[in-house]
Amino acid sequence: MKIFKCQQCAQILYFENGTCVGCRHRLGYLPDRGQMSAVRPDGTDWVALAAPEGRYRFCANWELSACNWMVPAGGGETYCLACRHNRTIPDVSDPDNHRKWQQIEEAKRRLFYSLIKLRLPRPVSGDGHPEPLVFDFLADRPDGGEKVLTGHDQGQITLALNEADSVRREQMRAGMGEAYRTLLGHFRHEIGHYYWDRLVRDAGNLESCRALFGDERTDYGEALQRHYDNGPPADWQQHYVSAYATMHPWEDWAESWAHYLHIVDTLEMAGAFGIAIAPEVDDDGTMETNIDFDPHKAHRIATVVDAWLPLTFAVNSLNRSMGQPDLYPFVLPPDAVAKLGYIHDLIRQGR
């Protein structure tokens, strides 16, 4: 993620801002330019100060306070590049549903920022693709029926609305022994399953993927039951990025994919802040890094990981100083780095 600033008053902005706190200008994100822009009305359209030669309109979900992205005026699109993938949203006449859906959309826009930067395919319904990317955001039935489960199936990503309840999400994280559970993490994990279909299955990369992640033809239901009955192997930290990654090759891929997006997005933000790490006690320089490159365009995974490891040591140390758990509660063994490298190379080849 980049740092943005208001074109009117130079106030630093968050990606989620809808109004500049400095000059009170309305703000909109221009995904075609990768810019957050102050905007002013021009009839039914808006002039973006970052691109005054064009005219824009807000995504239709802006009217529901659920999106701050814009679309070019006159193009016929009413939804932005992220929202046009929504197939089902909850009943937003319920204030609790509305609030949770707004949080879900915030996380989804951060996901799509990365997908656009990495130039990954994002087919939508109606464009003729056999497996378009669609999202269903579903609430549990009020009659206490079967609970909604977050998951992916042939291009359809379902996200349980209750994942936007921070208390319930933390209860689930603790109950399942997970180190990390966030809305953005869910999106990055589930989209990984989608891109396994695109970049591995459909691109003829099954054998090379199996050589690293294992054979995905292993019965998924049996693997899931075995994982919940017995837990991960005792030596899982020597080979996997998370305990859940040990469950099945598909989950190893999705966990590795999610971590790749975590790393790339966080490194871009660290670089935007000019962060450099150079501990005085580090005599041999192994913990030094200067994040002066675009991680989305790095040629080698080693460049990315060599910057990531010192950064995570620093931010984890800062969190501990505040009595907080580690911001990045994971270890990257060589086998996990090799999997990240495989994903990195597939994305570069696709571009």
Image (cartoon, helix red, strand yellow):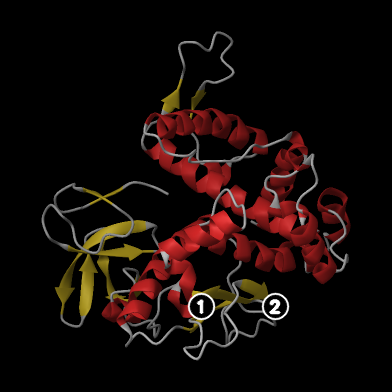
Q: Residues within 10 Å of mark 2 (few under 14, many from 20)?
A: few
Q: Compared to 333, does 18 lie above or below?
A: below
- Judge left or right: residue 284 versus residue 62: right
* Amino acid marked by disc 2: Gln
Residue bearing mark 1: 85
Alpha-carbon span between mark 2 and mark 1: 14 Å
Q: Compared to 78, does 108 lie above or below?
A: above
- Judge left or right: residue 33 versus residue 201: left
Secondary structure of residue under mark 2: loop
Kindly indicate the quadrant of the structure image that contains residue 21: bottom left
Q: Compared to 285, does 228 lie above or below?
A: below
* Amino acid marked by disc 1: His
**Which residue is at the front of the view, 53 or 72?**
72
- The residue positioned 18% from the left and 47% from the top of the image is 10
Counting from the top left corner in percent of width and height, residue 235 is at 79, 39
Counting from the top left corner in percent of width and height, residue 157 is at 59, 74
Kindly indicate the quadrant of the structure image that contains residue 322: top left
**Which residue is at the front of the view, 84 or 278?**
278
**Which residue is at the front of the view, 24 or 188?**
188
- Judge left or right: residue 319 versus residue 193: left
Going by the picture, which residue comes out furthest to the bottom? 143
Q: Residues within 10 Å of mark 1 (few under 14, many from 20)?
A: some
Secondary structure of residue under mark 1: helix
The numbered disc on residue 154 is 2
- The residue positioned 16% from the left and 76% from the top of the image is 42
Going by the picture, which residue comes out furthest to the left? 23
> Is residue 63 in view from this perspective?
yes
